[in-house]
Image: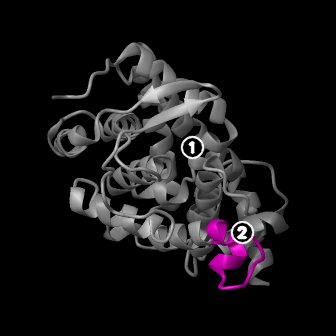
Amino acid sequence: MKPPYTISPKIIELISSISIKLGEMNALYLDKQEPKLRKQNRIKTIFSSLQIEGNTLSEDQIEAIVNNKKVIGPAKDILEVKNAIQVYDAIQNFKPNSVKSFLSAHKMLMSGLVDQPGKYRNKGVGIVKGSKVAHLAPSYKNVPGLMNDLFAYLKKDEDLVLIKSCVFHYELEFIHPFMDGNGRMGRLWQTLILLHEYPVFEFLPFESIIHSSQKEYYKALSQSDNAGNSTLFIEYMLTVLDKTLKEVLGFKNKTMSSEQRLEYFVQIGMSEFTRLDYMAVFKTISSATASRDLIKEWN
């Protein structure tokens, strides 16, 4: 069965807004090697996704671990970070439509943290908020079939990838196929689904927006549970993606001094470029300003 949801006017509006911004992002990032930016965004992604799950390590500590430096902190939290680094480093090797690849990613992400990483749960589970059960997941006996149906939807349905990625994220949280790691797997797999369609998502740490709006994140999940469909969660996640794109593009176009522009442009790693390339990154400057900047760099 196709997961239940409707395409609301808000969803259509957000898809249009995101599509326009993705076009701008493609012009700024595609075919440009930006290893520093990629590394920074990966650190932000890991920090935000694990903070949502209660990890106590700071962004600086995670950066230190990425750089193979020792940090002081709870062993479990450090292992969570090391596992996440391994998974995100290998993200291009995972296949978004593959159950086998999905289970392999969970095994890598949760190794040493749960008894059977990479295996579906074999008991019932519920999510408790305060003194109340906020969500009672389907029986563990139904999990394999439900996940197979979800992957079949992902592979065969003709809806836009932007929508399917949100639906997959919600349905994964609803099914709750693992004893632990469902939240981080939902966010990881949505990233993977989007990345295969839109490579610029490698530069978009949308988990940071989720992290800063956790109440809205869980509210959207709860409201979709109560409604019996994922429409409201799709709206929430598309809003997150739209805000992430807006923030990245806003940074690109903010007012900078010539020194700041040159420093940033050198950091993104373009060894050969034209004045037009430079102006494509800094859209608010004139051709004369671009020429003056580049003369400073060459001198």
Which element type, helix, strand or loop, lies under badge 2? loop
Q: Is residue 171 visible?
A: yes
Residue 167, x across and y down, in percent: 35, 34
Type of amino acid under label 2: Pro
Compute the Cα span from label 1 to label 2: 34 Å
Q: Which label was assigned to residue 74?
A: 2
Q: Which of these two is toward me, 178 or 249?
A: 178
- The image quadrant where one finds the N terminus is top left
Tell whether 175 sits left or right of 32. Answer: left
| Mark 2: few/some/many CA within 10 Å (<14, 14-19, 20+) | few
Residue 86 x %, y %: 48, 74
Kindly identify the residue that appears in the image at 58 percent across and 56 percent down. 280
Task: Inspect the image, locate mark 1, and give the three-letter code of the amino acid beneath it.
Answer: Leu
Residue at the spot 66% in from the left edge and 51% down from the top edge: 54
Q: Which residue is mark 1?
A: 245
**In front of the other: 234 or 147:** 147
Span shown in magenta? 62-78
Can residue 279 be seen at all in this image of the molecule?
Answer: no
Q: Position of residue 57 (x, y in %)?
A: 73, 63
User: Could you tell me which residue is drawn at 35 percent across and 20 percent down?
Assistant: 229
